[in-house]
Image: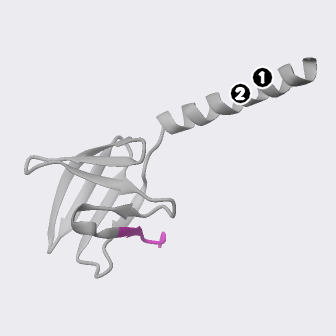
Amino acid sequence: MSHALHHLARAATISLVLLLAACGQKLEGVYTDPVGLSKYEFAPGGKVYFSLMGTRTEMKYEIDGKNVKIYNEMGNQVFTLLEDGSLQGPMNIKLTKLPKP
């Protein structure tokens, strides 16, 4: 009986750690489309900087499960966080993270 209780306590601890880690999810770094036309730079504090053709715009983002919600005045966007760490966006555009310089 104590062996089963030990496994149950261990599973509960692991679940709690995973839950707390999910609550603190964040993105960092620069993500770009395959052509390099647009860039999303995720920064601390829920900020994301979107660059397109020389124009840079600051927006806010939050992560809700596998959804990355980007809020801006022109309309909100929802990206899907994929297993490989890339983002799948509107019109099926896939953004991949650039390596750190």
Residue 7 position (above or below residue 24) = above
Front residue (pair 24, 55): 24
Residue 30 position (above or below residue 47) = below
Q: Secondary structure at mark 2?
A: helix
Q: In the picture, residue 37 is in which quadrant?
A: bottom left
**Residue sitting at the far left:** 74
Q: Residue at x 14, y 75 (%)?
A: 53
Q: Residue at x 36, y 66 (%)?
A: 31
Front residue (pair 64, 5): 5
Q: Residues within 10 Å of mark 1 (few under 14, many from 20)?
A: few
Q: Three-letter amino acid code at disc 2?
A: Thr
* Structural distance between the alpha carbons of marks 2 and 1: 6 Å
Q: Three-letter amino acid code at disc 1?
A: Ala
Residue 39 position (above or below residue 58) = below
For residue 55, side relative to residue 20 (left or right): left
Residue 96 x %, y %: 40, 69
Q: What residue did someone put label 2 on? A: 13
Would you say residue 14 sits in the magenta stretch?
Answer: no
Q: Residue at x 41, y 60 (%)?
A: 29
Q: Which residues are magenta?
A: 95-101
Quadrant of the image containing the N terminus: top right
Residue 56 x %, y %: 17, 62
Q: Residues within 10 Å of mark 2 (few under 14, many from 20)?
A: few
Q: Are marks 2 and 1 in contact (CB under 8 Å)?
A: yes
Residue 19 x %, y %: 56, 32
Q: Secondary structure at mark 1?
A: helix
Disc assigned to residue 9: 1
Residue 4 x %, y %: 86, 23
